[in-house]
Image (tube, rainbow, N blue to C red):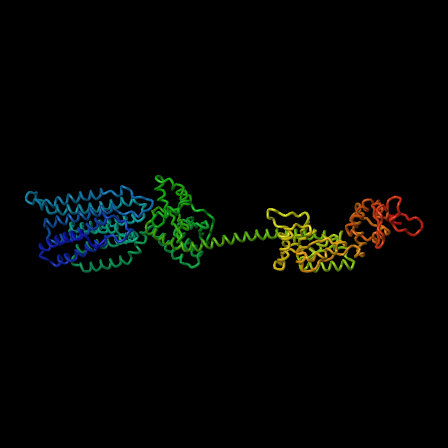
């Protein structure tokens, strides 16, 4: 919008015409000329001040036009009063100007722009009945004055005081109407932030104008028809300023200053006026004293205005102190200091301001000593959304109370406010949106929240928003730390349990492997067995895959278990694979050597393994040097190597499977190669097959027969004979009769093979002849000697 428009030139034309007419009647005096020059400038300032400068400015255009009308009327009234007194035209112009200012002021009060929010303006507050009544008052005064101008001869002769009384009465009535209109706006729109402050300022201005003008007119310091219209113009211009001011907070501050000046200045002005009028000879000293009193009033006006603020300015001071404390670098200390400053502005010790945090959900408060307390709490639903719709992001209890009937959705939130005895809640935001809100308790307060306090609370909330971001981050870090500590504690307990389970499993694996390896480890007295076992332990410590070549009847499983017990993987699983019974999995399940990590795999009868599985095993052994880690399982193969096929096994060295072993096969000794171990093997086998608690033994002659036998079936044949003999033994010793009863036929090295029917009744004895002598009695266990013998 341009600085001026057509209405400005119209106003300048009217004012200039009236000024020129007044100057002609006075003879172009200096005052008239000065006003002719200053008038357009004053109107230019008024037009520029009432223009729209911001897009978000919600002031109604009707209020702007009313303010321009009042400014034009003020300049016209000055021009009229600078003309000769008693001129009907000038009196008519002055009356019309005063009436226009009064009507424009009351109309502007009905058009105070709302600041938005949940509360809509009441229709009764926008009524223009006050403007109509004011127009009626001035219409009467204007009719009296116009009668003299239009029909001076036919009109009855009126006393000149009648004209003065008409203007005086209309001015006083207009000031009273302005007061009533402003008070009505204050009452009907008291929940609208900013509107109440503007209305209260208008009330203060009307009271000030009445309290100053009426006494001055009563003591006749100046003519009443001059003083009261002048007070009316001052009040009208002030009310327009309160309505059109962009910052309602400045209006509130100015209102307090106006009241303070009225309290201090009005008595001084009246006293000076009365004394000057009564004692004109002392006018100079009285004026000097009045000036001194004015200076003193200006010095103490701020202190006088402070108690006039909301809640005696305790809230403003407390919020300002809290905003200052929010600048402390450490976030927790800053929040504690801010909450403590807010707490101290309440007289009730139980009133506690609270900071509600959105994430992690908690409420922060301080005690009387200033110590921070944090408790988990969930934010009420909808409080942040409604708070963002309110001016200065402050949601008040009074607003929710007023909306209780028309908006049932706010009733749960209103109940929450009443339970917490809350007065208002200011939403705290950061760049990502709401992070919580600042809750202030009522604490016995009865006044509504002012725009100054709301603005101060928003400034405090903006500072707290930065602190909340850090505080929320620290709270989330502490929560994560606590959660991690709990998880670590649980994991440590689980780890301890798992370690115990693994240790138990490892011990069970060791015991299992030790049980299987006992036949190979417990009877190594012969040189052949010691050499074979030493070589086996060396290969086991290096965890290298090996091939065990064993005669028929040798317990290869025991030697493989001994390999596992001597390897670094003794705590791992020992998996025995029976090659003939291992099928090829059609569903893609890997063979056992793929999931036996950390242990040892023993494969019996490798030549009976399926072709596909042999190919997979060849691939596994080919990659063994690259995969030789602590978990890679070594492969132990058991191969039967009976004497009659030893040449065939030796020729199998060209087989791809056997060629992948880095060392030659380990040949396990036959039983005849370890005669020193035979006695311990026999005694151990019989001791394990005893009856009850008493182990079995063997007769010397029977043991000699066992030791002289060649044992082509090795340990398996030996254990079979001993098992059957132990089952039919009647005493505690196995004798030759028991061996003969189970069909044992000793065959010494180099002796001819026995015919199949030897040993049967009618044939020759299979036992060598014993020396002649008295018949031998069966050995029995010695009897216990009686005690004391």
Q: Is residue 706 visible to the viewer in this orientation of the structure?
A: yes
Place residue 628 in its image quadrant.
Answer: bottom right
Q: Position of residue 281 (x, y in %)?
A: 16, 58
Q: Which residue appears at 77% of the width and 52% of the height? A: 715
Nearer-the-camera pick, 9 or 751: 751
Q: Determine the residue located farthest toward the left in the rendered image.
A: 153
Q: Position of residue 352 (x, y in %)?
A: 42, 49
Report whether 774 appears left or right of 644. right
Nearer-the-camera pick, 491 or 410: 491
Q: Position of residue 258 (x, y in %)?
A: 26, 53
Report whether 220 appears left or right of 380. left
Nearer-the-camera pick, 107 or 663: 663
Report whether 558 appears left or right of 464. right
Place residue 139 in its image quadrant.
Answer: top left
Q: Position of residue 617 (x, y in %)?
A: 64, 54
Q: Is residue 218 visible to the viewer in this orientation of the structure?
A: no
Place residue 760 in its image quadrant.
Answer: top right
The number of numbered discs placed on residues in the rendered structure image is: 0
Report whether 370 appears left or right of 488. left
């Amino acid at each position: 919008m341009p600085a001026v428009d057509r209405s400005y030139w119209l106003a300048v034309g009217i004012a200039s015409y009236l000024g020129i007419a007044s100057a002609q009647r006075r003879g172009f005096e200096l005052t008239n000329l000065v006003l002719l020059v200053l008038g357009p400038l004053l109107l230019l300032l008024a037009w520029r001040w009432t223009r729209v400068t911001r897009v978000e400015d919600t002031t109604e255009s009707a209020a702007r036009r009313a303010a321009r009308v009042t400014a034009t009327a003020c300049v016209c009234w000055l021009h009229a009063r600078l003309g000769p007194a008693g001129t009907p035209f000038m009196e008519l112009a002055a009356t019309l100007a005063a009436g226009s200012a009064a009507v424009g002021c009351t109309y502007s009060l009905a058009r105070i722009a709302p600041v938005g929010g949940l509360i809509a303006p009441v229709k009764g507050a926008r009524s223009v009945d006050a403007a109509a009544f004011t127009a009626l008052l001035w219409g009467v005064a204007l009719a009296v004055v116009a009668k003299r101008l239009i029909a001076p001869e036919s009109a009855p002769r009126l006393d000149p005081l009648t004209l003065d009384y008409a203007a005086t009465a209309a001015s006083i009535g207009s000031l009273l109407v302005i007061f009533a209109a402003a008070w009505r706006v204050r009452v009907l729109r008291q929940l609208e932030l900013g509107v109440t402050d503007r209305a209260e300022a208008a009330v203060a201005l009307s009271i000030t104008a009445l309290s100053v003008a009426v006494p001055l007119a009563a003591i006749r310091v100046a003519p009443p028809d001059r003083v009261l219209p002048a007070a009316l113009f001052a009040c009208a211009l002030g009310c327009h300023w309160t309505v059109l001011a962009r910052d309602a907070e400045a209006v509130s501050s100015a209102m307090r200053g106006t009241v303070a000046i009225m309290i201090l200045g009005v008595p001084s002005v009246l006293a000076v006026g009365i004394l000057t009028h009564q004692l004109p000879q002392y006018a100079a000293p009285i004026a000097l004293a009045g000036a001194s009193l004015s200076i003193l009033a200006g010095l103490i006006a701020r202190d006088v205005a402070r108690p006039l603020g909301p809640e005696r300015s305790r809230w403003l001071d407390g919020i300002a102190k809290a905003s200052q404390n929010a600048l402390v670098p450490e976030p927790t200390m800053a929040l504690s200091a801010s909450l403590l400053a807010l707490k101290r502005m309440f007289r009730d010790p139980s009133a506690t301001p609270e900071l509600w945090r959105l994430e992690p959900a908690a409420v922060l408060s301080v005690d009387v000593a200033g110590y921070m307390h944090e408790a988990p709490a969930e934010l009420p639903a909808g409080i942040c959304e409604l708070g963002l719709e309110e001016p200065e992001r402050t949601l008040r209890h009074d607003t929710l109370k007023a909306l209780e009937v028309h908006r049932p959705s706010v009733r749960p939130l209103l109940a929450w406010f009443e339970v917490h005895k809350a007065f208002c809640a200011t939403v705290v935001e950061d760049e990502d949106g709401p992070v919580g809100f600042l809750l202030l308790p009522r604490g016995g307060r009865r006044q509504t929240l002012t725009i100054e306090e709301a603005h101060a609370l928003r400034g405090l909330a903006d500072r707290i928003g930065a602190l909340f971001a850090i505080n929320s981050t620290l709270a989330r870090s502490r929560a994560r730390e606590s959660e991690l500590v709990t998880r670590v504690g649980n994991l440590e307990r689980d780890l301890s349990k798992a370690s115990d389970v693994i240790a138990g499993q490892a011990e069970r694996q060791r015991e299992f492997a030790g049980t299987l390896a006992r036949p190979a480890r417990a009877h190594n007295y012969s040189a052949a067995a010691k050499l074979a076992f030493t070589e086996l332990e060396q290969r086991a410590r290096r965890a290298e895959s090996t091939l065990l070549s064993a005669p028929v009847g040798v317990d290869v499983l025991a030697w493989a278990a001994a390999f596992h017990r001597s390897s670094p993987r003794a705590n791992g699983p020992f998996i025995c694979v029976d090659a003939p019974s291992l099928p090829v999995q059609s569903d893609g399940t890997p063979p056992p050597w793929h999931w036996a990590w950390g242990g040892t795999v023993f494969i019996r009868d490798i030549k009976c393994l399926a072709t596909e599985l042999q190919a997979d095993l060849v691939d596994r052994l080919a990659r063994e040097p690259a995969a030789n880690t602590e978990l890679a399982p070594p492969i132990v193969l058991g191969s039967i190597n009976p004497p009659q096929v030893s040449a065939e096994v030796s020729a199998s060295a060209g087989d791809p499977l056997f060629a992948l072993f880095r060392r030659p096969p380990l040949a396990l000794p036959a039983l005849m190669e370890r005669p020193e171990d035979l006695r311990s093997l026999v005694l151990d086998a019989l001791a394990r097959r005893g009856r009850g608690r008493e182990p079995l033994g063997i007769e010397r002659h029977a043991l000699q027969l066992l030791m002289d036998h060649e044992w082509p079936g090795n340990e398996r044949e030996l254990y079979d004979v001993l098992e059957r003999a132990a089952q039919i033994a009647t005493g505690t010793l196995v004798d030759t009769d028991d061996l003969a009863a189970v069909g044992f036929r000793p065959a010494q090295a180099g002796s001819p093979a026995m015919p199949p029917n030897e040993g049967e009744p009618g044939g020759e004895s299979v036992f060598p002849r014993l020396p002649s002598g008295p018949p031998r009695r069966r050995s029995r266990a010695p009897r216990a000697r009686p005690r004391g013998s």
